[in-house]
Amino acid sequence: MEGNNFEKTAEQAAAFQKIWADSMTKIMQVAFASGPSSPPPEVLKQIRSGIFGALAQSWDEFMRSPQFLEAMKQWMDTAINFRKMTNDFMGRVRNEMQAPSRDDVDTIMLTIRHMEKRVLDRVEALEEQLHAMNGASSRPAAGRPRPPQPVRARPRPSKKVSTNRKGKK
């Protein structure tokens, strides 16, 4: 098993070395392909664009190579397994400490949200019923007797002396 990993690593390193050598060869070919009639700034622009083109092509080839894709797959699998192991370990630690886990907290939060929604729905229904009752008591429906109104005490007359319009008492 260990020899197999070493062989894969050696193959990946050889593939990377080949891609790197190819890209450097292409860079050198572009750098020295310009003629003596080109002005110096133009030569530098050609060299720069050739270098960037060669690097882009070589890295594109490298990143699409089966060796790179296999290495990335292994790396992602390892990262996922590590994440699962740490989550399981921390879950066991919380369980041993009798502390609530994230799942416990999420479940409680979800339950509270459901209860809150139910309470708000009931309050809205009661509000609608109250508005309907208030609307019905202010105007009686046809053929229905009006419910009895509470008896209110009449205000007592005040002892103020009133004045007439001309200011006489």
Image (tube, grey):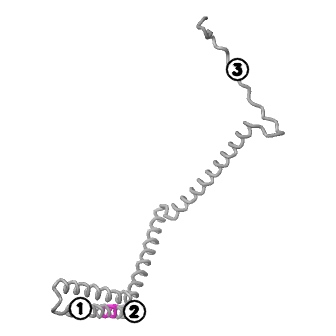
Q: Residue 148: give x, y in percent of width and height.
A: 78, 32
Q: Residue 32: give x, y in percent of width and height.
A: 19, 93
Disc 3 from disc 1: Cα separation: 108 Å
Residue on which disc 1 sits: 30
Sequence order check, earlier mark of 2 and 3? 2
Sequence order check, earlier mark of 3 and 1? 1
Q: Residue 105: give x, y in percent of width and height.
A: 51, 60
Helix, strand or loop for the magenta stretch, by majority: helix
Q: Residue 107: give x, y in percent of width and height.
A: 55, 62
Q: Point out the frontmost of discs 3 and 1.
A: 1
Residue on which disc 3 sits: 154
Of 114 and 143, the residue lying toward us: 143
Q: Amino acid at mark 1?
A: Val
Residue on which disc 2 sits: 1
Sequence order check, earlier mark of 2 and 1? 2
Q: Point out the frontmost of discs 2 and 3.
A: 3
Instruction: Give the answer, above or below, for where 160 lies relative to 106.
Output: above
Q: Which residues are magenta?
A: 9-14
Q: Callout 1: 10 Å neighbours few (<14), some, many (20+)?
A: some
Q: Amino acid at mark 2?
A: Met
Q: Is residue 167 left or right of residue 87?
A: right
Q: Amino acid at mark 3?
A: Arg
Tag 3, which secondary structure?
loop
Q: Callout 3: 10 Å neighbours few (<14), some, many (20+)?
A: few
Q: Point out the frontmost of discs 2 and 1.
A: 1
Q: Quadrant of residue 42?
A: bottom left
